[in-house]
Amino acid sequence: MLKISARMLTNRQLFQLHMGLPSVVSDPLEIVKAEGIYLYDVSGDQYIDLVSGVSVSNVGHRHPMVLSAISEQLEAYMHVMVYGKFLHSPQVKLAARLASVLPPALQSVFFVNSGSEAIEGALKLAKRLTNRTELVSFRHAYHGGTAGALSMMGHERLKNAFRPLLPATRLLDFNAVDQVHQISSQTAAVLIEPVQAEAGIILPEPGFLQALRDRCDETGAILIFDEVQMGFGRSGKLFAFEKEAVIPDILCLAKAMGGGMPLGAFISSKERMQALAHHPELGHITTFGGHPVSCAASLAALEIILDDELHLKAEDKGRMYEDALHDHAAIRQIRRSGLMLGIELQPDIPMYELMQQIFKQRLIVDQFLFNDQSFRIAPPLTITHAEIEESAGRIVQALNLTIGS
Ligand SMILES: Cc1ncc(COP(=O)(O)O)c(C=O)c1O
């Protein structure tokens, strides 16, 4: 039988034949270059990225300072040893810089590879600290795809086929202060996104996060904030917890943390974090966590955000989109935290058709996992006012074409 060589096939055919994928993607965009807020495909078309690789590219694609930090580290070393055995200067510099912008209760950084792994590490730390098993999370929460993170997911659709998952999990409703009493002296951890992202950008009502903090203090449960999606300036503050001035016991970060490279972390106090080094020693192990190249990129990205005050500018930039879109007839509601918007359409507006119209306008947007009638706008925080006006104008045009006006 004639064996077809991979070289005779197009990338598109190889994609269909050999890529393991979690969904059926018939005609994916083939990207050949990314720069700032722009993506370029194989046919030379330019797109404005309004998703940032799902809250990753906060400093834009291939920021020159991130690139030079990566090159410099590549000249020195890449992976040399599993996490924590050697001192890697990119890790310690990054940990110290993060500590300098975090409160005293969050000074010890455990580096991992991803958001899901940050959640796993945080749950393990909470169990180890409390010697309890019950884990509390919230309906419509997304915390990642690994077994522990999946156990905390607030939606059955992606979860049910994989049971049994972690036992003793309990779901509460987001913003339901009257359910907070269900957190008890059996509870090891309460895991929450301070702004629920995949639920469609659901903001905490004033006092809700504080009520959780108070109840965790009363019961000894560990409060974990998942800022994998909202961290690093997206919310208009460097971290979303600053908005409500409620400080978690453990903070989980990833996505934008690496400036485009894979990196995550869970952060707690030195005292708490030490529990992973005793009874048992090696309480969490990772080979690549805190990869030196990722840490170098991450430090550069953090300095860019702080120097250019991207976090402080996110609020005004987000409001520009809100002002441009809020009175459109096709839009039912806009929910927003900084430069992260959930645009909810009127019930009769067909989402699929709108997505196609937006794509024709050469814009990249995305839907949410747990909110079918909303789509997200979350461009790089570096986007300029002129680029916001341009992209908002194109969204209006796509909305007009969808409703036929
Ligand atoms: C809030 C939140 N937590 C955790 C994760 C999991 O992160 P990762 O995909 O890096 O494992 C995600 C990913 O979308 C997320 O949005």
Image: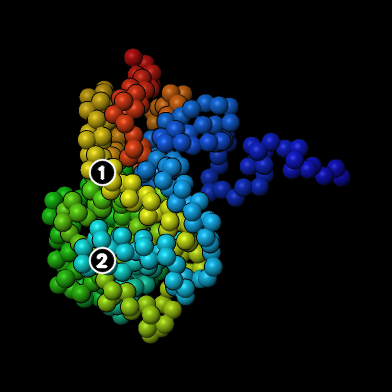
Q: Nearer the viewer, residue 203 or 79?
A: 79
Judge from the rendering whether residue 237 lies leftward or rightward of residue 305; answer left or right. Answer: left
Q: Nearer the viewer, residue 309 or 335?
A: 309
Identify residue type, mark 2: Leu
Q: Marks 1 and 2: which is nearer the front?
A: 1
Residue at 20%, 74% in the rendered image: 220
List the residue tagged with mark 1: 309
Residue 169 in picture, x, y percent from top left: 33, 67
Residue 93 in picture, x, y percent from top left: 36, 62
Colour scheme of the rendered structure: rainbow
Outermost residue, bottom direction? Answer: 279
Residue 398 in picture, x, y percent from top left: 38, 22
List the residue tagged with mark 2: 106
Outermost residue, right direction? Answer: 1
Residue at 35%, 57% in the rendered image: 253
Judge from the rendering whether residue 228 lies leftward or rightward of residue 211; answer left or right. Answer: right
Residue 174 in picture, x, y percent from top left: 23, 54
Neighbourhood count class around disc 1 (C-alpha, 10 Å): few under 14, some 14–19, many 20 upward: some
**Is residue 399 visible in the rendered structure shown here?**
no
Ligand 1: does it lie within 8 Å of the C-beta at label 1?
no
Q: Is residue 108 above or below residue 160?
A: below
Report the quarter where the N terminus lies.
top right
Q: CA distance from mark 1 to mark 2?
A: 22 Å
Report the quarter where the C terminus lies.
top left
Residue at 47%, 73% in the rendered image: 86
Secondary structure of the residue carrying numbered label 1: loop
Neighbourhood count class around disc 2 (C-alpha, 10 Å): few under 14, some 14–19, many 20 upward: many
Q: Nearer the viewer, residue 262 or 191?
A: 262
